């Protein structure tokens, strides 16, 4: 690859890729705080179902408790 090809490739890459901005256009932290305050934090139903399943497993098979604790 000679210098002319390298210059052509550099020019094509600069045209194809937009310049990268180091800073966002606006501060994102206030909007993030509004999103966090907008809805209360709650666990989805499948988290409760998984917890109930683990409690049920431990109740019916007490020997599984050390195995579950090992994987936690």
Image (cartoon, grey):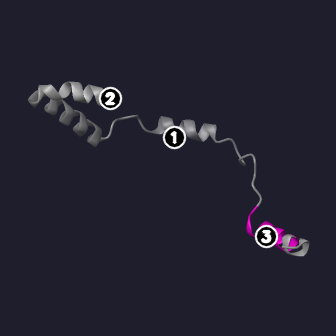
Measured in 3D between alpha carbons, the distance from the residue under mark 2 to the one under mark 3, in whole angstroms, is 51 Å
Q: Earlier in the sequence, mark 2 or mark 3?
A: 3
Image position, residue 33 (x, y; %): 56, 35
Residue lying at 57% horizontally and 39% vertically, measured from the top left:
32
In this view, which residue lies farthest toward the front? Answer: 1
Predominant SS along the magenta part: helix
Which-is-in-front pick, marks 3 and 1?
Answer: 3
For residue 15, the mark is 3
In the rendered image, residue 71 lying in the magenta stretch gets the answer no
From the image, tell me which residue sits under label 1. 35
Which-is-in-front pick, marks 2 and 3?
Answer: 2
In this view, which residue lies farthest toward the right? Answer: 3
- Circle 1: element type: helix
Residue lying at 75% horizontally and 52% vertically, measured from the top left:
21
Q: Earlier in the sequence, mark 3 or mark 1?
A: 3
From the image, tell me which residue sits under label 2. 72
- Magenta range is 7-18
């Amino acid at each position: 690859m000679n210098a002319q090809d390298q210059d052509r490739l550099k020019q094509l890459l600069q045209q194809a890729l937009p310049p990268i901005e180091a800073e966002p256009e606006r501060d994102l932290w206030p909007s993030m705080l509004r999103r966090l305050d907008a809805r209360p934090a709650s666990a989805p139903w499948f988290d409760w179902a998984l917890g109930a399943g683990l409690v049920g497993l431990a109740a019916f098979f007490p020997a599984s408790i050390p195995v579950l604790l090992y994987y936690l």
